[in-house]
Structures are given as structure tokens and as C-alpha cells.
Amino acid sequence: MRPSDGSSPEPARSSRVTFLSSLRVGVETLRVNPLRTFLSTLGVIIGVASLVAVLSLGDGMEAFARREMARTTNVQDVFVTPVLFDTVDGLSVPRERFPLFGEADAAAAEAGVRGVEGVALSFSGTTFVQAPDGRRRAARVTATRAGAAAMHEIEVRPGRFFTAAEAVGNAPVAVVSHTLAEALSPGDPGALLGREVEFRGGPRRVVGILPPREGEEGFGVYVPLAAGAAMMAPAEAARARTLVLRAPRVEDVDSVRAATEAWLAQRDPRWERSYTVGTQRARAEQAMRALLVFKLFMGAITAISLLVGGIGIMNVLLASVTERTREIGIRKAVGARRRDIVLQFLAESVAITGSGSFVGMIVGVAGAFAVTAAMRASTEAPIHAALSLSTLLVAALSALVVGLAFGTYPALRAARLSPIDAIRHE
């Protein structure tokens, strides 16, 4: 029964049959010469394996670089500090009064600033420590929130950082640096864990010790925020407290800064007179630029690998056109159109890239994990290959594009052959 508009489904059905026939002929042709097919597929395997391995290594190394930047730098931080000086007649005059952030302000910022990963509040000063030999040692004490350890990735070994409950209750606990533990317990710093140490303001139990750091100088102590004022040596004025808001990524610093300024404006429309909001913008831009250069470098390497594989495909298909000139002429003489010949050769190209990309993905993933395992063994750096769905999709689509791009010229060359000249070709 014909459609109501008078059109016939026969041409569409015939086109589908011709298309499937061309694909079948193209795939069957690859089986005639398996050695040639394998050699052409080998180029795709190498190209896709290189692409997957480089992308996986690149993602893993980028994740490692981001973790190291977050742990060792403050490029992801937004700082809110009170204004401490006024400029009068070209001179900086200290303010007698300025706002002091408290635990409630930090909690409000954590809840009210959109997109923030964590909020820290701290201030520092000096304190005295009573050593076992009776000497008084000076140490730098930092009063902070319990969440500072997770936000700044402060490693404590042995022991732990003080908890939120201990911070709220102002428990007499402290986390000391390795140098201070060594000074208070020579030869066995770990023995200080759990013992009480006499600080300015009273004794405190050591709940954690920081691991040793290369080039570490001086003594350091972390205590809950409420304990800071009592432990620190007296000062003429109150110590300013800095509110630090961390963005999830370097790219989010500007948006977190804007959200922080909006939060301050809700609290005080004239907040610019009392606070300054700052970032390490220059360092953040430098970090983002370094990541971009790294990605472009990796992309250039993978492009070369795929280009080599694509050239191999084109060479094989051009050789196939030369060897099968008479076959092409016969097909055109019995009614094959240019489109049918183009589809046949493109089908061969896609079949080569499809099978090669599948094997290449497996080889590339295995290679990436093997390389990162060797890197961890030799450098002890926690670098792991990152395999994502986007990496596999990029590899598959890139192989398909390369197969179509480098198979188009041989296909068009075959389709343009004259049937008479092709049949007479020796």
C-alpha cells in the first residue's frame, strides 16, 4: 500500500540495502589480506593506546598537582581581614578598635557563602613552654578551628588533631610540632603523646605531633581558638583574626571572592571600611596557566600519535585502491555509484579504526597504570592514573574522526575512476 502523499518507500529501502551492501563488501575485503589489515590496524592501536595512556597520565598528574597546590599553597584561599590602619596625611595610623571574627562568624560564613569548600579562622602569637630541664622555650602558637586540619591538610603523626567538641569546650589539648616534641622529649619525640606539658596559661595534654619537615625551624603549637588569648604573651592591642574561605578549585577563586563580598554586604552595607578581601590572584593565575600549558603539551603529543596512525590508514587504503582498480571498474560497470564506492572504502577505514581503537584502549589503560605504579615505586609520590568515561569517549571519537578523515581521499580517488580505464588496468 502506497503512502497517502503518493511517495514510494522503495527508493529509501533500496538506498539502505545498497548502503549495507557497501559496508559488507568493505568489511569482507579486509579479510582477504589479513597481514595488510593487521599492519594498518597496528598503527591505530599504537595511536589510540598513546592517546589513552597520555590522557590517563595527564589526568592523574593534574589531580596530583592540584592536591599538592591545595596542601602546600594558599592559591585557593580567599582572605577576609579587618582594616588595622587609617591613612592620615600620608601616614598609616593604627586603629584603636577593629572588628574581631569569632566562631559564630566562621560558622555563618560557612553556611552563607555559596560554593565554599571550607572556612578557617585563626590568629597567632608567642607562648612559653616549660622544658623538662627547667628551661623556658618560646614557641609560636596558632589558635584555630578544629576543621583547619582537614581544610589545610595538616598531617598529624602520631596522634590526631583536636576535635570540634574539644574546640567548643576549650579542652586543655594541644598539637605540637616535631621540633618541639624533640626538644621536650629528646631521643623519643613520640613519647610526648598523651603527656601534659606546661604552657603559658596552664598545662595542656599533647594529643598529636606533626611529622618532621625538611628545613623546619622553631617550635610550633596548635590549640583551640578559645584558648589562644590565654596562651599568648600579652599584647598592647587585640590580635587581628583572619577568616579564610577555601574554593574547591583554583578556577573557583573569583566566584568565591564575589560570594564572600556579597555575604559581607548583607552583614554591613559599608563593609569596605572595616574589612579587606584578598586572594593570591597572581599565583592562582600562574597555577591555572601552568595547568593549561600541561594540557596543551599532552594534547600535542597525542595528536602526533593519532596523525601517525591516520597516515598509515591512508597509505594502506591508497595501496588497496591501486590493487583493486579492476574490481572497482567492474562494480561501477554493473551499476555501482560513486557513493557506493566511497561507502565501501570508508567502511574499511572505520572497521580498521574501530577494531584498532578497542585494542588500543586496553593497551593504553594497562600502560598508564603500569607507568604510574613505576613512578610511585621510584618517587613515593601518590600519583595514580585517572581513567574516566570522557577519556574513553575522546579516544573512540578521535579514532573514528581520523579513520574518516584519512579514508576520505582514497575513497574519493577510487570513486572517480573511469569504469573503462579501471577494467583495462593491469
Image: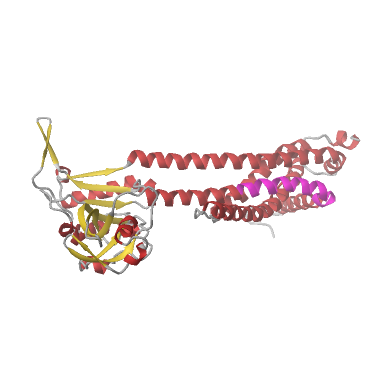
Question: 9 or 278, which is in the foreground?
Answer: 278
Question: 332 or 367, which is in the foreground?
Answer: 367
Q: Is residue 30 highlighted in magenta?
A: yes
View extreme (top): residue? 90
Residue 147 location (% of width, % of height): 30, 61
Quarter residue 326 falls in: top right
Q: Main secondary structure of the magenta part?
A: helix
Q: Residue at x 38, y 39 (%)?
A: 285
View extreme (front): residue? 133
Q: Is residue 24 left or right of residue 87?
A: right
Quarter residue 289 falls in: top left
Q: Is residue 165 highlighted in magenta?
A: no
Q: Is residue 218 above or below residue 307?
A: below
Question: 401 or 361, which is in the foreground?
Answer: 361
Q: Which residues are magenta?
A: 29-51
Q: Is residue 398 above or below residue 148?
A: above
Give the mark count: 0
Residue 62 location (% of width, % of height): 48, 48
Q: Is residue 83 left or right of residue 3?
A: left
Q: Is residue 393 left or right of residue 252?
A: right
Figure coloring: secondary structure
Q: Residue at x 40, y 48 (%)?
A: 69
Query: What is the quadrant of the N terminus in the image?
Result: bottom right
Q: Residue at x 54, y 39 (%)?
A: 297
Q: Is residue 394 above or below residue 312?
A: below
Query: What is the quadrant of the C terminus in the image?
Result: top right
Residue 171 location (% of width, % of height): 22, 68
Question: 296 or 102, which is in the foreground?
Answer: 102
Residue 292 location (% of width, % of height): 47, 41
